[in-house]
Amino acid sequence: MSAKAKTPDWYPEELSAARPPEQITVSQWAERNRVLGRHAAIKGPYSLEMVPFLVPIMDACNNPDIDEVVCCKSAQIGGTDGLLCNPIGYYCDQEPSSIMIILADQETAQYVGAEKIEPMFTDSPALLKHYDPKTFNREEIKTRNGGYISIAWASSVAKLGSKPIRIVICDEIDKPGYYAASKEASALSLCRERTNTFPEGYRKHIFFSTPTDETGNVTVELFSCDVIFDWHIPCPSCGQFQPLRWSPDALYTYGFQGGKYRGDDGMMYKLGGVVWEGGRHATREQISETARYQCGSCGYLIDDIEKNEAVRRGKMVPRTETTGQERKIGFHINRLYSLFDGGKLANLVQSWVNVQKYVGETKQKQIQGFINSSLAEPWKQVIIKAESSKILSARCDLPPMVVPDEAVALFCGIDVQKSGFWFAVRAFSRDYTGWLIDYGFLPTWDDVENKLFNTAYPSRDGSATHRIWRAALDTGGGAKDEGELSMTEETYWWIIKNVRRGVNIWGTKGSSRPIPGRFKPGEDLISSPSGKRLPPRFRIILIDTETMKDTYHAGIERAVSGEAMTGEGTFYLHNETGEDYSAQILAEEKRIDARKHVAEWVRVKKDNHLLDAEVLAISLAHPQWIGGGVNLVAPPAQQANQNNGQQQQQTRTGMRVLSKGVEV
């Protein structure tokens, strides 16, 4: 008779690890099992009622058909609990896995581990059985059922690259730590590499953050998604489902075109927005009594009670038609959806009105904070963004190729390209008033030489002709075909060959850093890019192009407004200047970089060559130019009395100044 088979003695932890996961979503698991303890604003069982808009986002975190989840969100709407803690809790309880949490910096990482993750395990009975205090530390957690959690920070490249991970959760990916300079790949790239050993449908990336600017990580990730979803709420009056936005204005609706959205029926509808009486000067009483959300379809004014009820009845709607094959999906949630006090319309309006009381750069930062943190919109503050009509309003009655009678010298800026040259010629008076008299494109070096050395421009009264006195060539130009000299090198040797031909010629380069005084000679260049030895004392003049672009636009503004100021630079255009010119001037805009809190010129279109040429021309004439600007030229009355020898001596004087720059 055979002995009775003995049932193995299994530890509870082993039985838990072997148990298959329940057929539930992350949100269902959280509502059943999460308990919020001493650190939570609302203590007790976790409730989805207060965060209905987070439910589809949480559920995407364990959907096998989705590999990446991106959420661009406002601050303080329950994102850390919903998108970090709940997925961790679900996977540790239901599917013990290797999980890595990435925070922006070490201090935040350690705080989240000690004040968020560990309390979640100790406060929730479903997780307490997996909790082992001996394996909980600031950077690593092991659960009794075989789960593993690594807590890292974005600037710790070595930490990110150490071991394979199934699930990666990155919090606040627009914080500075994610942009820390490194010889290795970006933090987000390294996060993705950690999951490469796991198959599609099993690995998971969860990225979320409040945004900074349109180049920030979360905005870039969101708009690289296969589809983006918004939480649409029904209007209490007309029933039209719509996303909540502060205003239909483009500043508050990044990613939407023309202030319209796609409804769940595929049709386009007008966005609504928050309205109130009193504008930026509204009193607290006005705001409290009149702040409403105006339906974009019927104009009905929705109060807070109606809004909150509509949020609970909302649904996720894609911005574009879906195919069912999307594996990277994005979500956008702002504070208007919040059912907590921070989402009350009056509180949001009051915050906006308070921001308007600041001035200068502080106001810009406060506005950015509101747009980023409350509205979850990327900051795109354009300081200088002129229209073509405004630029061309600087045209005066001067014909092209003609020099005004009060002008004393001509200056030419040449932007060197891989193939060809863009140029601008300006006539200047001694008080730094400038007139554009010629611009365009020159195909070859021969054409450049003809323009600089052979072209004479008549004065308006016909009594004299003028040739170009100074010229500056940008020494960029780019690489050419293999085996050919780069345009930088070609420019060097052309300057060396032609510098004594009667025109003061400089080689220039834009500086990546501010320059006190706007201009300075670079170091002596010993050899060319190909290694050929250059003549002694060969230098390139460095130009603070950021400042000089400001100077150009300020000069155009003075010409348009008629408020010319002696010595400050007023820059006119000839009367046939066309949109071919203005299009290249408008190829750059000055914007505030949200992360660096500085204003920078940003190229928004490819061709900005005439702007670069203009910067060179006005730099040559600037009073702070190397050796002096147009103000060193004799006044017209004195020039009329000078003989040819005196004029030649003046030119030689200019050449001696040049010898401190690039002349050999």
Image (cartoon, rainbow, N blue to C red):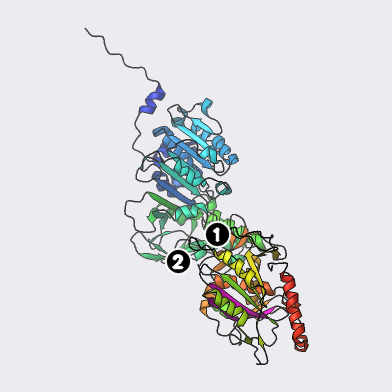
Res. 616 image quadrant: bottom right
Is 516 placed above or below 115 here?
below
View extreme (left): residue: 1
Give the number of the mark in front: 1 or 2. Answer: 1
View extreme (top): residue: 1
Q: Is residue 332 visible?
A: no
Q: What residue is drawn where x is 46% and y is 41%?
A: 168
Q: Amino acid at mark 2?
A: Gly
Most foreground residue, 600 or 275? 600
Q: Amino acid at mark 1?
A: Trp
Q: What residue is drawn where x is 53% and y is 25%?
A: 134
Res. 570 image quadrant: bottom right
Q: Which residue is mark 1?
A: 379
Q: Which residue is mark 2?
A: 259
Disc nearer the start of the sequence (1/2): 2
Task: Point out residue 150 in the picture as x, y percentages from the top left corner.
Answer: 50, 35
- Overall secondary structure of the magenta stretch? strand
Q: Residues within 10 Å of mark 1 (few under 14, many from 20)?
A: many
